[in-house]
Image (tube, rainbow, N blue to C red):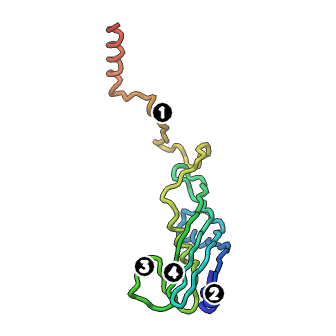
Amino acid sequence: MKWTLGQLQKYRSKDFPIDEMVNVEEIKKVDPSIRDVSPMHVTGWADIDSTKVTFHLKINGQLVLPCSRTLVDVGFPINVETTETFLLKDFSNEIEEDIHQVKGDVIDIMPIIEEIILLEVPIQVFCEDSSEEGAPQSGKDWEVIREKTVEDKVDPRLAGLAKFFETDHHSSE
């Protein structure tokens, strides 16, 4: 998604609609936990004037990430809205978060779209369907313990205490 300044200036004070499907497969190289990326649907518009170009974008798509518990593939939807401004002239006194300086005669918003998608990747994602087991559940000297199993076992140090309440309960009747 690149435009020259000449192409954009034709739309000064007019609507410049954006509706494109973009391929962002490159983000898998940056974040190896991303297993797959669908094409992202980028929609929105641009406001163009003599000093700046402001893009109002909505990015929709899906990532495939590993489940933090079982390592199976989990679809994670991306639905982000952002506003990015490109200054056409050097205004170093204006400092805002979403302001970018145009280098040369071309505005390329693909690196920004990729960065926004990478920022949306969660630290942990869990699959809803727990019937599929992807990670090993046991190994040498270890196994995954379910909560029910832990609740059923009585700590051997407290076994005598459990007997105490049984005998105390029967003697009071």
Quarter location, residue 90: bottom left
CB under 8 Å between discs 4 and 2: no
CB under 8 Å between discs 3 and 4: yes
Q: Which mark is residue 85?
A: 4
Q: Quick one: label 2 or label 1, which is nearer the N terminus?
A: 2
Question: Local crowd at mark 4 within 10 Å, few (<14), some, or many (≥20)?
Answer: many
The residues tagged by marks 3 and 4 sit, at their Cα atoms, a distance apart of: 9 Å
Q: Residue at x 36, y 15 (%)?
A: 166
* Front position among marks 1 and 3: 3
User: Which secondary structure lies at badge 1?
Assistant: helix
User: Which secondary structure lies at badge 4?
Assistant: strand
Foreground pick, 135 / 169? 169
CB under 8 Å between discs 1 and 3: no
The residues tagged by marks 4 and 2 sit, at their Cα atoms, a distance apart of: 16 Å
Q: Which mark is residue 149?
A: 1
Foreground pick, 29 / 156? 29
Q: Residue at x 65, y 73 (%)?
A: 22
Foreground pick, 64 / 162? 64
CB under 8 Å between discs 2 and 3: no
Where residue 10 appears, x then y in whole percent? 64, 90
The three-letter amino acid code for the residue at tag 2 is: Tyr
Judging by the rendered image, the residue that carries numbered circle 3 is: 96
Where residue 98 appears, x then y in whole percent? 47, 77
* Front position among marks 2 and 1: 2
The residues tagged by marks 4 and 1 sit, at their Cα atoms, a distance apart of: 56 Å
User: Which secondary structure lies at badge 2?
Assistant: loop
Question: Local crowd at mark 1 within 10 Å, few (<14), some, or many (≥20)?
Answer: few
Q: Quick one: label 4 or label 1, which is nearer the N terminus?
A: 4
The three-letter amino acid code for the residue at tag 4 is: Thr
Q: Quick one: label 2 or label 3, which is nearer the N terminus?
A: 2
The residues tagged by marks 1 and 3 sit, at their Cα atoms, a distance apart of: 54 Å
Residue 151 higher or lower than 140, as above or below: above
